Amino acid sequence: MRKKIKFHIDHLDPLAQGVYKSDGDIFFISKTLPGETGTAIVTDNKKNIHFAYPDNIEVMSPERIFPLCPHYQDCSSCHYMHTSYAQETLFKQKALYKHLQKINCPHHQIFVHHAHDRFHYRNRIQLHYDLAREKLGIISRHMNEIIPIPDCQLVHKDISDKLKALYQMKLSDIVDASKHPPQGHLELALNETGKMFINQPYAYEGFSQVNAQQNHILLDLLSQAATKYVKNNPVILDLFGGNGNLTHHIEASQRHVFDLYKKIPAPKNGQTFYSQDLYAKDAINQLAKICPHPDLIILDPPRSGFKELGLLVKNFKPDMVFYVSCNPATFARDLSSIENYSVLEIHLIDFFPCTYHFETFGILVKQ
Ligand SMILES: C[S@@+](CC[C@H](N)C(=O)[O-])C[C@H]1O[C@@H](n2cnc3c(N)ncnc32)[C@H](O)[C@@H]1O
């Protein structure tokens, strides 16, 4: 039997959870807002830290709105649909400010770029399946099971029909039990004609940004920053570069793109691609063999960030560093490891409306 508690939300944490403290216990309650009171069901405990979801809101925040998505209450993928987009971006801004306290970045150097579309922006979605139980959908944290999401409001209109169509089919006709394990995942991707991949890694055909519109904003910011701050025709080291998205449009004399490629892509748009595990011990030495004197280092690591950033910058001493990150916590941690560089600008770009995720782009210059 799960425990029920009464709560009063003080503030939201950076992961969009309402925070309630009582007698040394801390409760993180999803899908609540500051000032709200009510009752919640506790789903998880770690010592005096508890996770819960609301089952009754007694005093509602004036900022609460009715969520547009029919799956919102049970789905764990969205976090802010119960409030306006203006509120959501304020919470995101506060989350970024909190992380940036580590590096003393003045607020006037931080710029926010809202999303053009709050809904239907994702060009990819990953769903879990369970053949024996005939389930396909998202794992609901509080229900601890797979819930169907045929009407997901985040997927691009061009794949939402395909998503709905999957739910009209028998799961055994979608996933061939003779080829695939009884439990797994499938990904629906917009690239080309709405491809489906079963039990392949996320972004199987190579990483690409999920929000094309916001990616354009990021690319424009990168070009403007390169024109404004970087010398003409720089040598660029593009780390965690994927398909070369971040550097293909920047004027440069050399663009070296590093990622974990199984097969190294052919050079394109003046970019040369190299396969390198950038978390390997000798990664910095390997980079130095190919590009010892970059003028600009651009990096865009996964959520775990790049702990070796301080060492990398100390070794290469580039004029500028452009750091693109999907995790403000590791972004702030990594920037705090750099010595003798100043932060010129930080941009919050909302790639992931309705969720607590966003991209951060930091521009650093050698002192
Ligand atoms: C956030 S994506 C950025 C990709 C690219 N910059 C873009 O804008 O599309 C992170 C990239 O890091 C790569 N990656 C993950 N682990 C890596 C590792 N150990 N070494 C090198 N690249 C890695 C992934 O393949 C992915 O392409």
Image (cartoon, rainbow, N blue to C red):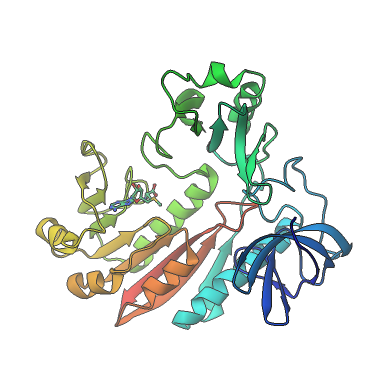
Q: Nearer the viewer, residue 187 or 360?
A: 187
From the viewer's perspective, tell me whether residue 6 is left or right of residue 229: right
Q: Residue at x 46, y 30 (%)?
A: 191
Is 116 above or below relative to 345? above
Which of the image's four quarters has the N terminus? bottom right
Could you say where residue 252 lies in the image, as x and y percent from the top left?
Answer: 25, 54
Q: Nearer the viewer, residue 307 or 331?
A: 307
Q: Residue at x 50, y 43 (%)?
A: 210
Could you say where residue 201 lies in the image, as x and y percent from the top left?
Answer: 40, 38
Label count reads: 0
Is 105 above or below relative to 80? below
State the image quarter where residue 341 is shown. bottom left
Which of the image's four quarters has the C terminus? bottom left
Q: Residue furthest front?
A: 1
- Answer yes or no: is residue 155 visible: no
Could you say where residue 313 lies in the image, as x and y percent from the top left?
Answer: 25, 72
Is 289 above or below relative to 150? below
Could you say where residue 65 lies in the image, as x and y percent from the top left?
Answer: 82, 55
- Answer yes or no: is residue 129 visible: yes
